[in-house]
Amino acid sequence: MGSGIITLRDSYEKIDIEHHFKVNAGPGAGKTTWLINHIRNVVQHSNRLGQVKKVACITYTNVAAGKIISNLGDACEYVEIGTIHSFLYKHIVKPYVSFLNIPELAVKEIKGHDDYGPNKSILYSVKEQSKQVYLKDKDLLEALLDLQWKFDSKGILQVLPRKIFKFKIKKETYIIYKKICWSMGILHHDDVLYFSWRLINEFPSILDILRAKFPYIFVDEFQDTNPIQAEILKKIAEKESIVGVIGDKAQSIYKFQGADVNQFINFNLNGMKEYKIEGNHRSTEEIISILNIVRNDPTFVQYSPENRHGCKPRIMVGDVMATYKRAKQICGKQTLWTLCYKNVTSNCLKNGYDVKDENIILEDIITNDSNPKRAKQLYYVISSIENARDNKIKDALKFMKRAMRKEDADRTALYQLQYFLDNYEIIKDKTLTEFYNTYFDEKVFDKSKITKGSVKDFYDSKKYSDMALAVKIDDDDCINRTIHKAKGDENNCVMVIIPESDDKTNYGLDFILNPNIAFEENRVYYVALSRAREKLFISIPKINDEVKDRLMKVGFEIENCS
Ligand SMILES: Nc1ncnc2c1ncn2[C@@H]1O[C@H](COP(=O)(O)OP(=O)(O)OP(=O)(O)O)[C@@H](O)[C@H]1O
Protein backbone atom coordinates (compact mmCIF):
# COMPACT_ATOMS: atom_id res chain seq x y z
CA MET A 1 0.00 0.00 0.00
CA GLY A 2 1.15 3.56 -0.68
CA SER A 3 2.45 5.74 2.12
CA GLY A 4 -0.70 7.78 2.73
CA ILE A 5 -4.33 8.30 1.90
CA ILE A 6 -4.87 10.39 -1.22
CA THR A 7 -7.80 12.85 -1.20
CA LEU A 8 -9.89 12.79 -4.35
CA ARG A 9 -11.19 16.27 -5.23
CA ASP A 10 -14.63 14.87 -5.98
CA SER A 11 -16.41 11.99 -7.65
CA TYR A 12 -15.15 13.03 -11.09
CA GLU A 13 -11.45 12.76 -10.34
CA LYS A 14 -9.74 10.03 -12.35
CA ILE A 15 -7.14 7.62 -11.03
CA ASP A 16 -4.70 5.27 -12.73
CA ILE A 17 -6.81 2.27 -13.75
CA GLU A 18 -4.12 -0.39 -13.34
CA HIS A 19 -3.70 -0.53 -9.59
CA HIS A 20 -5.74 -2.03 -6.75
CA PHE A 21 -7.60 0.59 -4.73
CA LYS A 22 -9.67 1.27 -1.64
CA VAL A 23 -11.91 4.33 -1.45
CA ASN A 24 -13.18 5.46 1.93
CA ALA A 25 -15.75 8.24 2.32
CA GLY A 26 -18.79 9.20 4.36
CA PRO A 27 -22.45 9.19 3.36
CA GLY A 28 -23.36 11.16 0.23
CA ALA A 29 -19.69 11.85 -0.55
CA GLY A 30 -20.17 10.44 -4.04
CA LYS A 31 -18.64 6.96 -3.68
CA THR A 32 -21.11 5.23 -5.98
CA THR A 33 -20.97 8.18 -8.37
CA TRP A 34 -17.19 7.96 -8.37
CA LEU A 35 -17.37 4.21 -9.01
CA ILE A 36 -19.65 4.75 -12.02
CA ASN A 37 -17.23 7.38 -13.38
CA HIS A 38 -14.29 5.10 -12.72
CA ILE A 39 -15.93 2.22 -14.60
CA ARG A 40 -16.56 4.55 -17.55
CA ASN A 41 -12.92 5.58 -17.41
CA VAL A 42 -11.79 1.94 -17.38
CA VAL A 43 -14.10 1.03 -20.27
CA GLN A 44 -12.78 3.99 -22.27
CA HIS A 45 -9.07 3.51 -21.63
CA SER A 46 -8.38 -0.15 -20.91
CA ASN A 47 -7.10 -2.37 -23.68
CA ARG A 48 -7.89 -5.45 -21.61
CA LEU A 49 -11.67 -5.47 -22.19
CA GLY A 50 -13.67 -7.04 -24.98
CA GLN A 51 -16.70 -9.21 -25.80
CA VAL A 52 -15.84 -11.79 -23.13
CA LYS A 53 -13.57 -9.71 -20.88
CA LYS A 54 -15.56 -7.41 -18.67
CA VAL A 55 -15.50 -5.25 -15.59
CA ALA A 56 -17.25 -6.97 -12.69
CA CYS A 57 -19.14 -4.51 -10.49
CA ILE A 58 -20.35 -6.08 -7.27
CA THR A 59 -23.15 -4.32 -5.40
CA TYR A 60 -24.85 -5.18 -2.13
CA THR A 61 -28.40 -5.48 -3.49
CA ASN A 62 -30.13 -5.98 -6.82
CA VAL A 63 -31.76 -2.56 -6.35
CA ALA A 64 -28.28 -0.95 -6.18
CA ALA A 65 -27.22 -2.97 -9.24
CA GLY A 66 -30.23 -1.61 -11.16
CA LYS A 67 -29.32 1.98 -10.24
CA ILE A 68 -25.73 1.58 -11.42
CA ILE A 69 -26.86 -0.03 -14.68
CA SER A 70 -29.21 2.88 -15.40
CA ASN A 71 -26.37 5.36 -14.81
CA LEU A 72 -23.66 3.62 -16.80
CA GLY A 73 -25.07 4.29 -20.26
CA ASP A 74 -23.16 2.68 -23.14
CA ALA A 75 -20.38 1.47 -20.83
CA CYS A 76 -22.84 -1.23 -19.66
CA GLU A 77 -21.85 -3.42 -22.59
CA TYR A 78 -18.49 -4.08 -20.96
CA VAL A 79 -19.69 -4.47 -17.40
CA GLU A 80 -21.29 -7.28 -15.47
CA ILE A 81 -23.19 -6.01 -12.44
CA GLY A 82 -24.73 -8.00 -9.63
CA THR A 83 -24.49 -9.11 -6.03
CA ILE A 84 -21.50 -11.13 -4.83
CA HIS A 85 -23.70 -14.21 -4.47
CA SER A 86 -25.08 -13.99 -7.99
CA PHE A 87 -21.58 -13.37 -9.36
CA LEU A 88 -19.96 -16.30 -7.55
CA TYR A 89 -22.89 -18.60 -8.31
CA LYS A 90 -22.79 -17.82 -12.02
CA HIS A 91 -19.03 -17.96 -12.49
CA ILE A 92 -17.85 -20.51 -9.94
CA VAL A 93 -20.57 -22.64 -8.34
CA LYS A 94 -22.86 -23.34 -11.28
CA PRO A 95 -20.19 -24.36 -13.80
CA TYR A 96 -17.86 -26.25 -11.48
CA VAL A 97 -19.63 -27.48 -8.34
CA SER A 98 -19.76 -31.07 -9.66
CA PHE A 99 -15.90 -31.08 -9.47
CA LEU A 100 -16.20 -31.32 -5.68
CA ASN A 101 -17.72 -34.80 -5.83
CA ILE A 102 -19.86 -34.34 -2.76
CA PRO A 103 -21.99 -37.52 -2.70
CA GLU A 104 -24.91 -35.80 -0.92
CA LEU A 105 -25.11 -32.95 -3.45
CA ALA A 106 -27.84 -33.43 -6.09
CA VAL A 107 -26.09 -31.25 -8.68
CA LYS A 108 -28.78 -31.65 -11.36
CA GLU A 109 -31.52 -30.55 -8.94
CA ILE A 110 -29.85 -27.23 -8.07
CA LYS A 111 -31.84 -24.30 -9.41
CA GLY A 112 -30.04 -21.33 -7.87
CA HIS A 113 -29.67 -20.26 -4.26
CA ASP A 114 -32.23 -19.07 -1.79
CA ASP A 115 -32.91 -18.43 1.88
CA TYR A 116 -35.07 -21.55 2.22
CA GLY A 117 -36.27 -22.31 5.74
CA PRO A 118 -36.56 -25.99 6.65
CA ASN A 119 -40.03 -27.53 6.71
CA LYS A 120 -41.29 -29.85 9.38
CA SER A 121 -40.19 -33.03 7.57
CA ILE A 122 -36.63 -31.66 7.17
CA LEU A 123 -36.61 -30.75 10.87
CA TYR A 124 -37.68 -34.31 11.63
CA SER A 125 -34.94 -35.83 9.44
CA VAL A 126 -32.31 -33.60 11.06
CA LYS A 127 -33.44 -34.67 14.54
CA GLU A 128 -33.52 -38.32 13.57
CA GLN A 129 -30.16 -38.37 11.80
CA SER A 130 -28.46 -36.42 14.59
CA LYS A 131 -30.16 -38.60 17.24
CA GLN A 132 -31.84 -35.62 18.95
CA VAL A 133 -35.53 -36.40 18.55
CA TYR A 134 -36.12 -34.65 21.85
CA LEU A 135 -35.25 -31.22 20.37
CA LYS A 136 -38.09 -28.71 20.13
CA ASP A 137 -38.90 -27.75 16.51
CA LYS A 138 -38.93 -24.09 17.48
CA ASP A 139 -35.39 -24.25 18.91
CA LEU A 140 -33.98 -26.28 16.05
CA LEU A 141 -35.59 -23.99 13.48
CA GLU A 142 -34.17 -20.92 15.20
CA ALA A 143 -30.66 -22.39 15.11
CA LEU A 144 -30.92 -23.57 11.49
CA LEU A 145 -32.20 -20.19 10.30
CA ASP A 146 -29.17 -18.59 11.96
CA LEU A 147 -26.49 -20.74 10.28
CA GLN A 148 -23.42 -19.27 8.69
CA TRP A 149 -20.17 -20.61 7.25
CA LYS A 150 -17.18 -19.30 9.21
CA PHE A 151 -13.42 -19.89 9.16
CA ASP A 152 -12.21 -21.78 12.23
CA SER A 153 -8.81 -21.11 13.83
CA LYS A 154 -7.15 -23.35 11.19
CA GLY A 155 -8.79 -21.49 8.31
CA ILE A 156 -11.25 -24.31 7.56
CA LEU A 157 -14.87 -23.37 6.91
CA GLN A 158 -17.35 -24.68 9.48
CA VAL A 159 -21.10 -24.16 9.55
CA LEU A 160 -22.40 -22.84 12.87
CA PRO A 161 -25.17 -20.53 14.13
CA ARG A 162 -24.17 -16.89 14.66
CA LYS A 163 -25.89 -16.62 18.04
CA ILE A 164 -25.32 -18.58 21.21
CA PHE A 165 -28.55 -20.26 22.34
CA LYS A 166 -29.78 -21.30 25.77
CA PHE A 167 -30.73 -24.74 24.43
CA LYS A 168 -28.08 -27.32 23.47
CA ILE A 169 -27.69 -28.71 19.95
CA LYS A 170 -24.91 -31.08 18.87
CA LYS A 171 -22.36 -29.41 16.60
CA GLU A 172 -22.66 -32.06 13.88
CA THR A 173 -26.39 -31.27 13.51
CA TYR A 174 -25.65 -28.37 11.20
CA ILE A 175 -23.71 -30.22 8.54
CA ILE A 176 -26.34 -32.98 8.68
CA TYR A 177 -28.94 -30.32 7.90
CA LYS A 178 -26.84 -28.91 5.06
CA LYS A 179 -26.43 -32.35 3.51
CA ILE A 180 -30.17 -33.01 3.70
CA CYS A 181 -30.79 -29.72 1.87
CA TRP A 182 -28.07 -30.40 -0.70
CA SER A 183 -29.53 -33.84 -1.43
CA MET A 184 -32.73 -32.00 -2.44
CA GLY A 185 -30.79 -29.52 -4.59
CA ILE A 186 -31.33 -26.72 -2.06
CA LEU A 187 -28.44 -24.23 -1.74
CA HIS A 188 -28.63 -21.38 0.75
CA HIS A 189 -27.07 -18.02 -0.13
CA ASP A 190 -24.23 -18.69 2.27
CA ASP A 191 -23.49 -22.09 0.65
CA VAL A 192 -22.50 -20.17 -2.49
CA LEU A 193 -19.58 -18.68 -0.54
CA TYR A 194 -18.64 -22.05 0.96
CA PHE A 195 -18.61 -23.85 -2.40
CA SER A 196 -16.81 -20.96 -4.12
CA TRP A 197 -14.09 -20.97 -1.48
CA ARG A 198 -13.59 -24.73 -1.74
CA LEU A 199 -13.62 -24.67 -5.54
CA ILE A 200 -10.99 -21.94 -5.96
CA ASN A 201 -8.74 -23.62 -3.40
CA GLU A 202 -9.10 -27.17 -4.68
CA PHE A 203 -9.11 -26.20 -8.38
CA PRO A 204 -6.96 -23.05 -8.70
CA SER A 205 -7.32 -23.03 -12.49
CA ILE A 206 -10.89 -21.78 -11.88
CA LEU A 207 -9.28 -18.59 -10.60
CA ASP A 208 -7.25 -18.20 -13.80
CA ILE A 209 -10.41 -18.49 -15.87
CA LEU A 210 -12.15 -15.94 -13.64
CA ARG A 211 -9.23 -13.51 -13.91
CA ALA A 212 -9.20 -13.89 -17.68
CA LYS A 213 -12.90 -13.06 -17.83
CA PHE A 214 -12.72 -10.15 -15.35
CA PRO A 215 -9.56 -8.02 -15.57
CA TYR A 216 -11.26 -5.55 -13.16
CA ILE A 217 -13.42 -6.38 -10.15
CA PHE A 218 -14.92 -3.53 -8.10
CA VAL A 219 -17.02 -3.87 -4.96
CA ASP A 220 -19.31 -1.14 -3.63
CA GLU A 221 -20.48 -1.04 0.05
CA PHE A 222 -17.47 -3.16 1.04
CA GLN A 223 -17.89 -2.27 4.74
CA ASP A 224 -20.54 -4.99 4.84
CA THR A 225 -18.46 -7.76 3.35
CA ASN A 226 -17.85 -10.99 5.23
CA PRO A 227 -14.51 -12.76 5.74
CA ILE A 228 -15.12 -15.41 3.05
CA GLN A 229 -15.92 -12.79 0.42
CA ALA A 230 -12.84 -10.77 1.39
CA GLU A 231 -10.59 -13.86 1.17
CA ILE A 232 -12.00 -14.81 -2.24
CA LEU A 233 -11.28 -11.29 -3.52
CA LYS A 234 -7.73 -11.39 -2.15
CA LYS A 235 -7.12 -14.65 -4.03
CA ILE A 236 -8.45 -13.16 -7.28
CA ALA A 237 -6.25 -10.08 -6.79
CA GLU A 238 -3.02 -12.12 -6.50
CA LYS A 239 -2.39 -11.65 -10.22
CA GLU A 240 -3.79 -10.20 -13.43
CA SER A 241 -7.08 -8.78 -12.13
CA ILE A 242 -7.34 -5.32 -10.56
CA VAL A 243 -9.50 -5.26 -7.45
CA GLY A 244 -11.05 -2.08 -6.04
CA VAL A 245 -13.22 -1.73 -2.95
CA ILE A 246 -15.32 1.20 -1.76
CA GLY A 247 -17.04 1.81 1.55
CA ASP A 248 -17.58 3.70 4.78
CA LYS A 249 -16.83 2.01 8.10
CA ALA A 250 -19.56 4.00 9.86
CA GLN A 251 -22.18 2.54 7.52
CA SER A 252 -21.51 -1.11 8.34
CA ILE A 253 -24.95 -2.45 9.34
CA TYR A 254 -25.07 -6.13 8.45
CA LYS A 255 -23.13 -7.67 11.34
CA PHE A 256 -26.17 -9.80 12.15
CA GLN A 257 -25.69 -11.45 8.74
CA GLY A 258 -22.00 -12.10 9.31
CA ALA A 259 -20.53 -8.88 7.87
CA ASP A 260 -17.35 -7.72 9.57
CA VAL A 261 -16.29 -4.09 9.21
CA ASN A 262 -12.66 -5.02 9.96
CA GLN A 263 -12.57 -6.74 6.58
CA PHE A 264 -12.86 -3.27 5.05
CA ILE A 265 -10.69 -1.42 7.57
CA ASN A 266 -7.84 -3.94 7.25
CA PHE A 267 -8.28 -4.80 3.58
CA ASN A 268 -4.95 -4.54 1.86
CA LEU A 269 -3.51 -5.80 -1.43
CA ASN A 270 -0.07 -5.69 -2.89
CA GLY A 271 0.39 -2.22 -4.45
CA MET A 272 -3.04 -1.03 -3.34
CA LYS A 273 -3.63 2.74 -3.18
CA GLU A 274 -6.00 4.23 -0.67
CA TYR A 275 -8.22 7.26 -1.35
CA LYS A 276 -10.80 9.34 0.44
CA ILE A 277 -13.47 11.79 -0.68
CA GLU A 278 -14.54 14.59 1.64
CA GLY A 279 -17.84 16.46 1.80
CA ASN A 280 -21.43 15.34 1.38
CA HIS A 281 -23.16 16.25 -1.88
CA ARG A 282 -26.47 14.70 -0.86
CA SER A 283 -27.75 16.52 2.20
CA THR A 284 -28.22 20.09 3.39
CA GLU A 285 -25.89 21.64 5.98
CA GLU A 286 -28.67 21.27 8.58
CA ILE A 287 -28.85 17.50 8.02
CA ILE A 288 -25.08 17.09 7.73
CA SER A 289 -24.66 18.84 11.07
CA ILE A 290 -26.84 16.14 12.72
CA LEU A 291 -24.88 13.42 10.88
CA ASN A 292 -21.63 14.85 12.28
CA ILE A 293 -23.09 14.69 15.79
CA VAL A 294 -24.14 11.06 15.38
CA ARG A 295 -20.79 10.04 13.86
CA ASN A 296 -18.99 11.87 16.67
CA ASP A 297 -15.53 11.66 15.14
CA PRO A 298 -13.51 14.89 15.41
CA THR A 299 -11.23 13.65 12.62
CA PHE A 300 -14.19 13.20 10.29
CA VAL A 301 -16.44 16.21 9.83
CA GLN A 302 -18.54 16.53 6.67
CA TYR A 303 -19.81 19.69 4.98
CA SER A 304 -21.87 20.54 1.95
CA PRO A 305 -19.45 21.46 -0.89
CA GLU A 306 -22.32 23.33 -2.59
CA ASN A 307 -23.20 25.04 0.72
CA ARG A 308 -26.78 23.80 0.42
CA HIS A 309 -29.14 24.92 3.15
CA GLY A 310 -32.71 23.95 3.99
CA CYS A 311 -35.09 23.52 6.89
CA LYS A 312 -34.10 22.19 10.28
CA PRO A 313 -34.55 18.44 10.83
CA ARG A 314 -37.75 17.89 12.81
CA ILE A 315 -38.62 15.55 15.67
CA MET A 316 -42.28 14.54 15.31
CA VAL A 317 -43.81 13.38 18.59
CA GLY A 318 -46.85 11.09 18.53
CA ASP A 319 -47.99 7.71 17.29
CA VAL A 320 -46.49 6.54 14.01
CA MET A 321 -49.56 7.15 11.84
CA ALA A 322 -50.14 10.66 13.22
CA THR A 323 -46.51 11.69 12.70
CA TYR A 324 -46.48 10.13 9.23
CA LYS A 325 -49.63 12.01 8.19
CA ARG A 326 -48.27 15.32 9.43
CA ALA A 327 -44.87 14.82 7.80
CA LYS A 328 -46.60 13.97 4.50
CA GLN A 329 -48.58 17.19 4.79
CA ILE A 330 -45.35 19.17 5.24
CA CYS A 331 -43.78 17.45 2.21
CA GLY A 332 -46.74 18.33 -0.03
CA LYS A 333 -46.14 16.91 -3.48
CA GLN A 334 -42.76 15.49 -2.59
CA THR A 335 -42.68 11.78 -1.78
CA LEU A 336 -41.93 10.95 1.83
CA TRP A 337 -39.98 7.80 2.63
CA THR A 338 -40.34 6.06 5.97
CA LEU A 339 -37.40 4.06 7.27
CA CYS A 340 -37.61 1.80 10.30
CA TYR A 341 -35.69 -0.97 11.98
CA LYS A 342 -38.24 -3.74 11.81
CA ASN A 343 -39.80 -5.35 8.80
CA VAL A 344 -43.21 -5.60 10.51
CA THR A 345 -43.28 -1.83 11.14
CA SER A 346 -42.52 -1.03 7.51
CA ASN A 347 -45.23 -3.48 6.38
CA CYS A 348 -47.73 -1.84 8.77
CA LEU A 349 -46.97 1.51 7.18
CA LYS A 350 -47.24 0.08 3.67
CA ASN A 351 -50.69 -1.27 4.52
CA GLY A 352 -51.83 1.72 6.55
CA TYR A 353 -52.26 -0.39 9.72
CA ASP A 354 -51.46 0.74 13.23
CA VAL A 355 -48.05 -0.52 14.18
CA LYS A 356 -48.57 -3.68 16.28
CA ASP A 357 -46.76 -6.83 17.45
CA GLU A 358 -43.31 -6.39 15.95
CA ASN A 359 -42.10 -9.85 16.89
CA ILE A 360 -44.38 -11.82 14.60
CA ILE A 361 -42.53 -14.15 12.20
CA LEU A 362 -43.81 -16.12 9.23
CA GLU A 363 -41.91 -19.21 10.38
CA ASP A 364 -44.46 -19.53 13.24
CA ILE A 365 -46.62 -21.33 10.66
CA ILE A 366 -43.94 -23.99 10.12
CA THR A 367 -43.45 -24.72 13.80
CA ASN A 368 -47.14 -24.71 14.70
CA ASP A 369 -48.51 -26.98 11.97
CA SER A 370 -47.86 -30.73 12.28
CA ASN A 371 -48.55 -31.08 8.55
CA PRO A 372 -45.40 -29.77 6.79
CA LYS A 373 -47.00 -29.69 3.35
CA ARG A 374 -49.91 -27.53 4.47
CA ALA A 375 -47.59 -25.25 6.45
CA LYS A 376 -45.42 -24.66 3.38
CA GLN A 377 -48.50 -24.08 1.20
CA LEU A 378 -49.67 -21.32 3.53
CA TYR A 379 -46.18 -19.92 4.01
CA TYR A 380 -45.54 -19.65 0.28
CA VAL A 381 -49.01 -18.48 -0.75
CA ILE A 382 -48.87 -15.60 1.77
CA SER A 383 -45.34 -14.74 0.58
CA SER A 384 -46.53 -14.90 -3.02
CA ILE A 385 -49.53 -12.60 -2.50
CA GLU A 386 -47.55 -10.01 -0.55
CA ASN A 387 -44.72 -9.99 -3.10
CA ALA A 388 -47.26 -9.48 -5.88
CA ARG A 389 -48.82 -6.57 -3.95
CA ASP A 390 -45.34 -5.06 -3.87
CA ASN A 391 -45.00 -5.56 -7.65
CA LYS A 392 -42.40 -8.31 -7.23
CA ILE A 393 -44.18 -10.54 -9.74
CA LYS A 394 -41.23 -12.81 -10.51
CA ASP A 395 -40.81 -13.67 -6.82
CA ALA A 396 -44.58 -13.92 -6.39
CA LEU A 397 -44.79 -16.55 -9.13
CA LYS A 398 -41.79 -18.40 -7.73
CA PHE A 399 -43.48 -18.66 -4.32
CA MET A 400 -46.84 -19.67 -5.80
CA LYS A 401 -45.19 -22.48 -7.79
CA ARG A 402 -43.44 -23.63 -4.64
CA ALA A 403 -46.76 -23.70 -2.80
CA MET A 404 -48.23 -25.77 -5.64
CA ARG A 405 -45.06 -27.91 -5.77
CA LYS A 406 -45.05 -27.50 -9.56
CA GLU A 407 -41.98 -25.59 -10.69
CA ASP A 408 -43.09 -25.31 -14.34
CA ALA A 409 -46.77 -24.40 -13.89
CA ASP A 410 -46.44 -20.68 -14.68
CA ARG A 411 -49.92 -20.26 -16.09
CA THR A 412 -51.71 -21.96 -13.19
CA ALA A 413 -49.56 -20.01 -10.72
CA LEU A 414 -50.51 -16.75 -12.39
CA TYR A 415 -54.18 -17.71 -12.38
CA GLN A 416 -54.05 -18.57 -8.66
CA LEU A 417 -52.26 -15.36 -7.84
CA GLN A 418 -54.84 -13.34 -9.73
CA TYR A 419 -57.62 -15.09 -7.81
CA PHE A 420 -56.07 -14.31 -4.42
CA LEU A 421 -55.41 -10.69 -5.40
CA ASP A 422 -58.97 -10.23 -6.69
CA ASN A 423 -60.27 -11.42 -3.31
CA TYR A 424 -57.65 -9.62 -1.23
CA GLU A 425 -60.03 -7.24 0.53
CA ILE A 426 -62.03 -10.22 1.85
CA ILE A 427 -59.09 -12.54 2.51
CA LYS A 428 -57.11 -10.06 4.56
CA ASP A 429 -59.63 -10.13 7.43
CA LYS A 430 -60.04 -13.93 7.48
CA THR A 431 -58.39 -16.21 9.99
CA LEU A 432 -55.73 -18.49 8.52
CA THR A 433 -58.14 -21.43 9.02
CA GLU A 434 -60.83 -19.73 6.92
CA PHE A 435 -58.28 -18.54 4.40
CA TYR A 436 -56.86 -22.01 3.86
CA ASN A 437 -60.06 -24.06 4.07
CA THR A 438 -62.14 -21.75 1.87
CA TYR A 439 -59.78 -20.05 -0.56
CA PHE A 440 -57.25 -22.74 -1.48
CA ASP A 441 -58.39 -24.58 -4.60
CA GLU A 442 -58.16 -28.31 -3.94
CA LYS A 443 -57.66 -29.08 -7.62
CA VAL A 444 -54.44 -27.07 -7.51
CA PHE A 445 -53.18 -27.60 -3.97
CA ASP A 446 -52.89 -31.08 -2.57
CA LYS A 447 -54.92 -29.88 0.36
CA SER A 448 -55.64 -31.28 3.84
CA LYS A 449 -58.24 -29.12 5.56
CA ILE A 450 -57.61 -27.66 9.00
CA THR A 451 -60.16 -29.39 11.24
CA LYS A 452 -59.23 -29.62 14.90
CA GLY A 453 -56.67 -29.60 17.67
CA SER A 454 -53.85 -27.21 18.52
CA VAL A 455 -53.14 -26.61 14.83
CA LYS A 456 -56.66 -25.25 14.33
CA ASP A 457 -56.36 -23.20 17.52
CA PHE A 458 -53.20 -21.62 16.17
CA TYR A 459 -54.66 -20.90 12.73
CA ASP A 460 -57.89 -19.60 14.29
CA SER A 461 -55.88 -17.16 16.39
CA LYS A 462 -54.08 -15.56 13.44
CA LYS A 463 -55.60 -13.37 10.79
CA TYR A 464 -54.18 -13.31 7.26
CA SER A 465 -53.27 -9.65 7.76
CA ASP A 466 -51.20 -10.49 10.89
CA MET A 467 -49.07 -12.95 8.98
CA ALA A 468 -48.82 -10.77 5.89
CA LEU A 469 -47.02 -8.19 8.04
CA ALA A 470 -44.22 -10.67 8.66
CA VAL A 471 -43.39 -11.22 4.95
CA LYS A 472 -39.94 -9.98 4.00
CA ILE A 473 -39.67 -8.56 0.50
CA ASP A 474 -36.30 -9.04 -1.21
CA ASP A 475 -35.01 -6.04 -3.14
CA ASP A 476 -37.59 -3.81 -1.53
CA ASP A 477 -37.53 -0.40 -3.22
CA CYS A 478 -40.86 0.98 -2.07
CA ILE A 479 -41.33 4.15 -0.01
CA ASN A 480 -41.90 2.34 3.33
CA ARG A 481 -38.80 0.23 3.90
CA THR A 482 -36.51 -1.05 6.55
CA ILE A 483 -33.33 0.98 6.99
CA HIS A 484 -31.28 -2.00 5.86
CA LYS A 485 -33.07 -1.99 2.52
CA ALA A 486 -32.46 1.73 2.02
CA LYS A 487 -28.69 1.44 2.16
CA GLY A 488 -27.02 3.26 -0.73
CA ASP A 489 -30.29 4.95 -1.76
CA GLU A 490 -31.56 8.51 -1.19
CA ASN A 491 -34.71 10.63 -1.24
CA ASN A 492 -35.62 14.29 -0.79
CA CYS A 493 -37.81 13.64 2.26
CA VAL A 494 -37.18 10.92 4.83
CA MET A 495 -38.88 10.03 8.11
CA VAL A 496 -36.99 7.72 10.46
CA ILE A 497 -39.22 5.83 12.86
CA ILE A 498 -38.03 5.20 16.40
CA PRO A 499 -39.91 2.54 18.38
CA GLU A 500 -41.30 3.24 21.85
CA SER A 501 -38.68 3.18 24.58
CA ASP A 502 -39.16 3.29 28.35
CA ASP A 503 -35.81 4.99 28.86
CA LYS A 504 -36.81 8.50 29.95
CA THR A 505 -33.27 9.80 29.63
CA ASN A 506 -33.25 9.45 25.85
CA TYR A 507 -36.51 7.81 24.55
CA GLY A 508 -34.51 5.74 22.06
CA LEU A 509 -32.54 8.76 20.79
CA ASP A 510 -29.28 7.76 22.45
CA PHE A 511 -27.61 7.73 19.03
CA ILE A 512 -28.00 11.54 18.99
CA LEU A 513 -27.82 12.38 22.71
CA ASN A 514 -24.95 10.09 23.62
CA PRO A 515 -23.43 9.28 20.23
CA ASN A 516 -21.13 6.32 19.77
CA ILE A 517 -20.78 4.97 16.25
CA ALA A 518 -19.12 1.80 17.57
CA PHE A 519 -22.62 0.46 18.27
CA GLU A 520 -24.28 -1.21 15.30
CA GLU A 521 -27.72 0.18 16.21
CA ASN A 522 -26.28 3.71 16.08
CA ARG A 523 -24.74 3.01 12.69
CA VAL A 524 -28.11 1.79 11.42
CA TYR A 525 -29.71 5.11 12.44
CA TYR A 526 -26.76 7.00 10.93
CA VAL A 527 -27.45 5.28 7.61
CA ALA A 528 -31.16 6.10 7.95
CA LEU A 529 -30.64 9.83 8.65
CA SER A 530 -28.08 10.14 5.89
CA ARG A 531 -30.57 9.02 3.19
CA ALA A 532 -32.31 12.45 3.32
CA ARG A 533 -31.47 15.18 0.84
CA GLU A 534 -33.72 18.04 2.03
CA LYS A 535 -36.25 17.20 4.72
CA LEU A 536 -35.50 14.91 7.62
CA PHE A 537 -38.09 13.84 10.20
CA ILE A 538 -37.72 11.58 13.20
CA SER A 539 -40.93 10.02 14.50
CA ILE A 540 -40.97 9.26 18.20
CA PRO A 541 -43.90 8.25 20.43
CA LYS A 542 -42.99 10.25 23.56
CA ILE A 543 -40.48 12.75 24.80
CA ASN A 544 -39.98 14.94 27.92
CA ASP A 545 -38.99 18.59 28.19
CA GLU A 546 -35.41 17.94 29.16
CA VAL A 547 -34.78 15.73 26.12
CA LYS A 548 -36.63 18.27 23.94
CA ASP A 549 -34.27 21.03 25.08
CA ARG A 550 -31.22 18.94 24.37
CA LEU A 551 -32.48 18.11 20.87
CA MET A 552 -33.29 21.73 20.08
CA LYS A 553 -29.79 22.74 21.16
CA VAL A 554 -28.25 20.40 18.56
CA GLY A 555 -30.39 21.77 15.74
CA PHE A 556 -33.79 20.06 15.73
CA GLU A 557 -37.25 21.54 15.65
CA ILE A 558 -39.84 19.67 17.71
CA GLU A 559 -43.48 19.20 16.73
CA ASN A 560 -46.18 17.52 18.76
CA CYS A 561 -48.47 15.50 16.47
CA SER A 562 -50.72 13.67 18.93
N1 LIG B 1 -19.22 15.71 -7.45
C1 LIG B 1 -20.53 15.81 -7.23
N2 LIG B 1 -21.18 16.96 -7.41
C2 LIG B 1 -22.51 17.07 -7.17
N3 LIG B 1 -23.28 16.06 -6.78
C3 LIG B 1 -22.70 14.86 -6.60
C4 LIG B 1 -21.29 14.67 -6.81
N4 LIG B 1 -21.00 13.38 -6.51
C5 LIG B 1 -22.17 12.81 -6.13
N5 LIG B 1 -23.17 13.69 -6.20
C6 LIG B 1 -24.58 13.43 -5.82
O1 LIG B 1 -24.60 13.22 -4.41
C7 LIG B 1 -25.50 12.19 -4.06
C8 LIG B 1 -24.77 11.10 -3.30
O2 LIG B 1 -23.88 10.43 -4.17
P1 LIG B 1 -23.53 8.88 -4.02
O3 LIG B 1 -24.78 8.09 -3.88
O4 LIG B 1 -22.59 8.54 -5.09
O5 LIG B 1 -22.80 8.91 -2.62
P2 LIG B 1 -22.27 7.71 -1.74
O6 LIG B 1 -20.98 8.16 -1.17
O7 LIG B 1 -22.24 6.45 -2.53
O8 LIG B 1 -23.40 7.67 -0.63
P3 LIG B 1 -23.79 6.61 0.52
O9 LIG B 1 -22.55 5.95 1.01
O10 LIG B 1 -24.40 7.49 1.56
O11 LIG B 1 -24.80 5.71 -0.07
C9 LIG B 1 -26.13 11.72 -5.36
O12 LIG B 1 -27.34 12.39 -5.54
C10 LIG B 1 -25.12 12.16 -6.42
O13 LIG B 1 -25.76 12.41 -7.66
Image: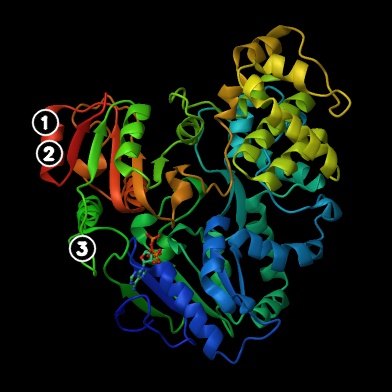
- Secondary structure, mark 2, is helix
Per the image, the residue denoted by label 1 is: 546
Report the residue that reaches farthest toward the top: 452
Rendering coords of residue 521 (x, y %): 35, 43
- Secondary structure, mark 3, is loop
Residue at image coords 35%, 84%:
2
Q: Quadrant of the N terminus?
A: bottom left
Kindly report the distance in space between the C-alpha atoms of the residues bearing marks 3 and 2: 21 Å
**Is residue 319 something that shows in the picture?**
yes
Residue at image coords 61%, 29%:
362
Q: What kind of residue is marked 3?
A: Val
Label 2 close to label 1 by CB (< 8 Å)? yes
Question: What label sits on residue 550 in the rendered view?
Answer: 2
Residue 481 is left or right of residue 546, and the answer is right
Kindly report the distance in space between the C-alpha atoms of the residues bearing marks 2 and 1: 6 Å
- Disc 3 under 8 Å from ligand 1? The reply is no
Rendering coords of residue 381 (x, y %): 71, 31
Question: What label sits on residue 301 in the rendered view?
Answer: 3
Residue at image coords 57%, 49%:
475
- Secondary structure, mark 1, is helix
Residue at image coords 64%, 65%:
87
Dot 3 or dot 1: first in sequence order is: 3
Q: In this view, does 302 lie above or below 549?
A: below
**Is residue 176 something that shows in the picture?**
no
- Disc 1 under 8 Å from ligand 1? The reply is no
Which picture quadrant has residue 300?
Answer: bottom left
